[in-house]
Image (tube, rainbow, N blue to C red):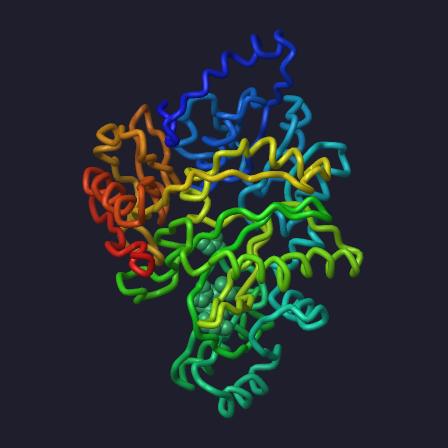
Amino acid sequence: MRCADGRRRGKGRPALRAARGETVMDVLIVGGGGREHAMAWKIARSAQAGKVYVAPGNAGTALEEGVANVPIAAGDIDALCAFARERGIGLTVVGPEAPLAQGIVDRFRERGLAIFGPARAAAQLESSKVFCKDFMRRHGIPTANWRSFSDARAARAFLRECKLPAVVKADGLAAGKGVVVAHERGDAERAASEMLSGDLFGDAGRRIVIEDFLEGEEASFICLCDGRSLAPLAASQDHKARDDGDAGPNTGGMGAYSPAPVVTGAVRERVMREIMRPVVAGLAADGIEYTGFLYAGLMVDKHGGARVLEFNCRLGDPETQPLLMRLRTDLLELCLAAVHRRLDGAAVEWDGRTALGVVLASGGYPGACDTGHVIEGLESVSEDDTKVFHAGTRLDGGVVRTSGGRVLCVTSLGDDVKQARERAYRACERIRWPRRFFRTDIGHRAV
Ligand code: AMP
Ligand code: GLY
């Protein structure tokens, strides 16, 4: 396997490295999307990594050197604990939000197993918008003004009077689909009623937040946290809408790039001072320790002020794919430093180039998808500066087939956004299956 940063790290076999006295540990990554493929690819190249297991993984992780899939679902916490104990896993790293909200970190810790991610109480920053907004209000963290409702009549009465556009958000986890930006009162009232009835998102929608619409440019800002100290990663930007020109329904993300020019050095300083450090300190003051990746979805205004749209308690998908193409520091070492509370002063180094990832999706996404197709052309992508991360794929007798909505994230490095984008799109054109689609304008704001 060629390395995206052009380096080959001849690590040698884990047993030989262990015999040389090097600390080598097996790692378990929980999840099976593009983010987890990128994490596994990066961690497998760590000098400290032995075998990297991914549960449940996808075809990309199955084919990755030094990586193996384990057929355990990301939500099966008991089975994951048992696997980690039986195999003597040195560190488990959690990709998606659902197991974090279910308390996977608490359960691993109770059993004395090392894991990187926030405990259930800390993961509420993502799993409950009401908790998150209330926390921000109490700790003076900049965000849109808001009110919460659990009664549909009261919500509709508020929406008949409020400013437009109005932003209606389901309280709980809704796979990136729980936010409606409504430009018409009727749409806002309908969204609120459908969420509160439980029809749209079940219990996750029985409470909603209605907040002011914020203007500006969005950016994703992610830090590693060890409970006290923070190590910020490079900023990135994703494209949530399905279609070119940021039109169409919201998705989990159709592409991303890093760095994000809107996050200048001054913006970064301000975000750390006004948002990221106060969050960790505020949680600590409330008796909650935050360890793990902390992702702030930001709206940056034209004066460089940033306000929080949302927090996620994990790395972003697809932001992780370009981010990890640029990361020069050993990701496993960073996670271990966080677990052992040694993040203070940790240096995080970046490839100075731009990385840009384009998601190739199945026909129908983000609705019901057409899957099961053989993916053609994967072997034609072999350039050093391009990596195809898998998401909704499965191996079927040596053949790679589509198995989900977001199928691949083709990610390239370039000297600037334009070059990264040209390289990524050149590779996208060579990969085909019936009804595959992708946005053709990823990175348009940065070009
Ligand atoms: P969230 O999942 O809360 O980040 O929301 C999904 C998307 O909805 C964001 O990426 C924004 O594009 C949009 N959004 C959410 N909240 C607001 C807001 N207060 N003002 C403007 N756009 C918003
Ligand atoms: N790309 C947005 C997210 O991971 O939530």
Residue 206 seen from this side: yes
Q: Is residue 277 above or below residue 321?
A: below
User: x, y (%) of residue 25?
Assistant: 62, 22
User: x, y (%) of residue 143?
Assistant: 58, 71
Residue that extends furthest to the bottom in the rendered view of this protein: 161
In depth, the one of 175 and 447 nearer the eye is 447
Q: Is residue 351 above or below residue 25?
A: below
Q: Residue at x 65, y 33 (%)?
A: 336
Quarter of the figure with residue 61 = top left
From the viewer's perspective, tell me whether residue 428 is left or right of residue 321.
Answer: left
Residue that extends furthest to the front in the rendered view of this protein: 266
Q: Quadrant of the N terminus?
A: top left
Q: Residue at x 55, y 34 (%)?
A: 331
Q: Quadrant of the C terminus?
A: bottom left
Quarter of the figure with residue 278 = bottom right
Residue 98 seen from this side: no
User: x, y (%) of residue 370?
Assistant: 29, 49
In depth, the one of 428 and 98 nearer the eye is 428
From the viewer's perspective, tell me whether residue 281 is left or right of residue 303.
Answer: right
